[in-house]
Amino acid sequence: MVAAIILLGSALALLCADAASVKPISTGFHMLYRTGDQPGDSPLPIGTLTDQHGKAIMTESGVVDISVNPDFSSLLTSPGGHIFSLVQFESSSPAGLYVTKLSQDVKTGKLTPVISKPTDWSAPDLQGLWIPCAGSVTPWNTHSGGEEYEPDGYCVGIATSINGPEATSLKKCTGDESGIVEFMRYFGFYSSNLTIADIKAHFNPYLYGHAFEVKLKNDAGDVEIKKHFTMGRHSYELWYAMPDQKTVYSSDDGTNQAFWKFVADKAGDMSSGTLYGAKLTQISDVYGGDFAVSWVKLSHGTQAEIEKMIVTDKITFADIFETAPWSANTSCPGGFTSVSKRGENALGASCLKLKAGMEKAATFLESRRYLAMLGGNVELSKFEGITYDPVTKKLYAAMSQIRNGMENNASKGKASPSFDEGGPNQIRLPYNPCGCIYAFDVTADFDINRMVGELCGQPLTVTTRFGVNKCDQRNIAEPDNIVTIGSQGTLIIGEDGNENQIDYMWQYDLFTKELTRIFATPYGAETTAPYWFPNTKGRFNGWTYLGAASQHPYAESDQARASDPDATGLQGYVGFWAMRASNFANGERLQFVGIPASSTNVSKHNIQAAAAAYTISTRTVVETVVNGK
């Protein structure tokens, strides 16, 4: 018998896995499709980028642009009970989201594409999809996602050219103008004929950087799409709706970012509510750190009033803020507030003064800058996936690296200490390029008040020990997307990073702390879309699924390997493990039989997945009273 003891609130819980109850169950990872496939009578290959008229977008070399970057892939059921896969493509710009109708083998659970089509983002309050990353399925059975790396409203406003030598060029201000230039293909403009006047006339930066939700309307796969302006504008990795269907937590991916909470006025309805940003007070710097979490209230807003600001009034950065130069010797002049100098790369926009009556515009259109002005934390780095576990009653989140604004002294890592200049330097941790998973204490009303390191990757002091790897392959490295497996007290963790050659997906037991490798990507790819799809209300005809995907093989590193004889192609992968829901009907839990680290050239060219078997065991939870309470 294996036992682990943990403290849940005021109750002591003893969890036991009886070896006699363990039984092996066959399973397998089934490829749903690779990007570029065109099942049945599909109008376009899956992943084809489309413009505002639904026509295929071309690359600069004149071929159809098909994204190889599938990220979150949801499984939803239509009103008539048909199963669909909704997959969002992270890049290039403009992005896309495809709806694919599936057939199901009821004997094996295997899913097969029948027909696929792109979604339409041409409505005035959408105007295209900007870099969607991870996602989740809401408690009310819709696909949720968000737009990452929001375009800089300040830079678009002051830009006098696209890539000229002057400081007010788009390239000089943002450091990288290519995202906007590529996105302009949505409106029919290509770099060969694009001017800054075209960008200013057609591209409104405040339409992008939002949470979005997609609902299946019928059995034909038609959808209803909403961008939720009420949830604030930042670099969304994803937003996650808690069981009360009102409290939503959102991660903010990138350098010197924030942690967000939105509380809706009505359950399942994001059209009005209040936005908050986290303030972290450090208690310890050990193993990822320990922090008290409090919340800074920004504003309450409604979809209608914020949409009017963006679409009708076309509010600009200059309407919201006054700016002043930031100086290392004098900081900001009187009346202006200093925000982290390197947390916002826009030149001259680090000393801000809010204009009269602009609180709501600042809250929902310049959320991170306004939070910094109000004293919230904007030092988090590569803040990735979020998930809630109903067994431990904790929220879990991935921080891909502990770097930049999170470092105590950034010069010891890869960055300059200037990432803390102009800000309060609230987080002071040792540099860890391998990243950490954090656990957040959640109260009975789904508030959060504490953040503690749960599982951290281990940097190698001698990198030659595992060849090209800089993080120990026996542990996580640069965690990205995560999800809990139902109510089993188990996390699935996906990786995305450059510190190790191959990215993996892991199963992590929150009680025994056992870590099992279950999935490996090809050279230069990352893991995406780990997600658990239970057979709620018989939705999947007696089957439950665990999703996994991999994007951009041979792109993030090892590009030369794409020409190897064993190379498997540049297309991304989307697939699922299928398991009978009846296996978990009585509280049983699964444990995958792990796979070894990819070590041969052939294995590094292929998707490797725990496919032979998994084991089912019963974990009983016995709660005993503590101190008579």
Image (cartoon, grey):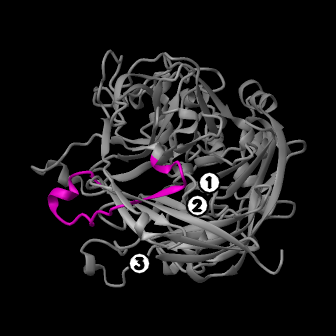
Residue 498 against residue 233 in the figure, above or below: below
Q: Which residue is mark 1?
A: 251
Q: Residue at x 67, y 55 (%)?
A: 348
Q: Earlier in the sequence, mark 3 or mark 1?
A: 1
- Label 1: how many Cα within 10 Å (few below 14, some 14–19, many 20+): many
Identified by mark 1, the residue type is Ser
Determine the CA span between mark 3 and mark 1. Answer: 24 Å
x and y, in percent, of residue 162 in the image: 50, 39
Residue lying farthest to the right in this orientation: 356
Give SS at disc 1.
Answer: strand
Q: Residue at x 54, y 27 (%)?
A: 198
Q: Which residue is mark 2?
A: 397
Residue 3 against residue 480 in the figure, above or below: below
Q: Residue at x 55, y 17 (%)?
A: 218
- Label 2: how many Cα within 10 Å (few below 14, some 14–19, many 20+): many
Position of residue 446 in the picture relative to residue 27 (left or right) = right
x and y, in percent, of residue 99 in the image: 46, 26
Residue 495 against residue 248 in the figure, above or below: below
- Of 404 and 546, the residue lying toward us: 546
- Of 104 and 344, the residue lying toward us: 104
Q: Which residue is mark 3?
A: 459
